[in-house]
Amino acid sequence: MTRIGAEVSAPASSANLGPGFDCLALALEIRCLVRARRSDQWQVRHIGRHQPPPGSADAVLAGARLAVGPEHPLYLEVDNHIPIGSGLGSSAAAYAAGATAALRCMDRPVDPNRVFRWVSTLEGHPDNAAAAVFGGLVLVDPDSRVRKLTMSEAYGLLVLVPAFRLYTSESRSVVPDRFELPAVVNSLSRMAALVAGLTSGEAGILQSALGDELHETSRNRLRPSVGELIGEALNAGAVYAAWSGSGPSVLVFTRSSEAGLVTEALSSSLGDEVEIVCPRVASRGIL
């Protein structure tokens, strides 16, 4: 029986997590949902809270067209709950959901590794792509293979989402091309501590991963308010906080037992200026 419709979702993601620049990401249970059905022409309708700005390229459409070819038009309905331009992998989720919905609608097999390669190409870097497709805590190795890591359940998650947008092109433009050796050594040490802390649940090790000289230092100069949010989170009792992807959102780790207290403290100190989201880790990617 030929399938004439499909429904697929892909999760938000927080990339880098501090020193894991362009190779580490965490999938978050905030999703972009795409419904697809066959049509006589390509059409996209956005009904979700978060929609692409007028005149911008449509990531869901781009993913779908790449997956099945422009000669197989589809009607796509997008219900997106991921803030756009906030460092939460909205484009990677849109590419992944669009491509997978198109494949399923056309009764074609879905190979996650192939979808990952498509999303990486469209996205321009693999970390968000890996999280969107596979879910969980993911590491992209030097051969572009995705390695899923087991994250400890010792932590609670918060995401601080400012009202303003910061697009990846602007945020990446301030990152230097070359670094002094001490900065590279510091980054390697922090990356090791980050992975060890996240997988072991030892908060002390995770705290030693705080800070980053490869991308956060320059981005803090671009948007000092993001660095201030990190400081607010730590002052409120968080174990760890970092730029989420290219920002301006901030990913915050707390001890599981203290997540409510940290959220309450941040709500009092930040007021209505910043939205506080409390997502679960998305253990699965495309669904």
Image (cartoon, rainbow, N blue to C red):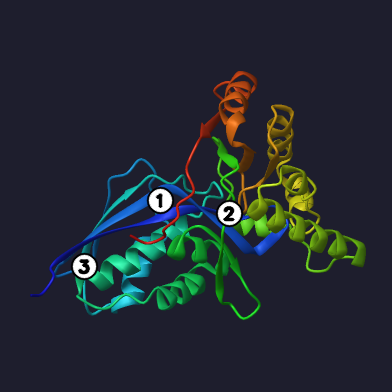
- How far is disc 2 from disc 1 in space, using C-alphas? 32 Å
Dot 2: few (<14), some (14–19), or many (≥20) neighbours within 10 Å?
A: many
Q: How far apart are marks 2 and 3 (CA)?
A: 38 Å
Decide which of tag 2 and tag 3 comes sooner along the chain. Answer: 3
Residue 130 drawn at (x, y percent): 51, 66
Q: If you read the primary sequence from the N terminus, does the residue marked by circle 2 or circle 1 appear first?
A: 1
In the rendered view, tell whether residue 126 sits above or below residue 190.
below
Q: Residue furthest left?
A: 1
State how far apart marks 1 and 3 are (Cα): 19 Å
Q: What residue type is labelled 3?
A: Leu
**Residue 34 falls left or right of residue 198:** left
Res 93 seen here: yes
Looking at the picture, which amino acid does disc 1 mark? Pro
Q: In which quarter of the image is residue 185?
A: bottom right
Residue positioned 50% across, 36% down in the render:
278
Which mark is drawn over residue 74? 3
Q: In this view, does 57 lie to the left or right of 4?
A: right
- Residue at image mark 2: 151
- Residue 52's label in the rendered image is 1
- For label 1, the SS is loop
Where residue 160 appears, as percent x and y from the top left, is: 58, 36
* Mark 1 or mark 3: whose residue is earlier in sequence: 1
Q: Element under label 3?
A: strand
Q: How crowded is mark 1: few (under 14 residues within 10 Å), some or many (20 or more)?
A: some
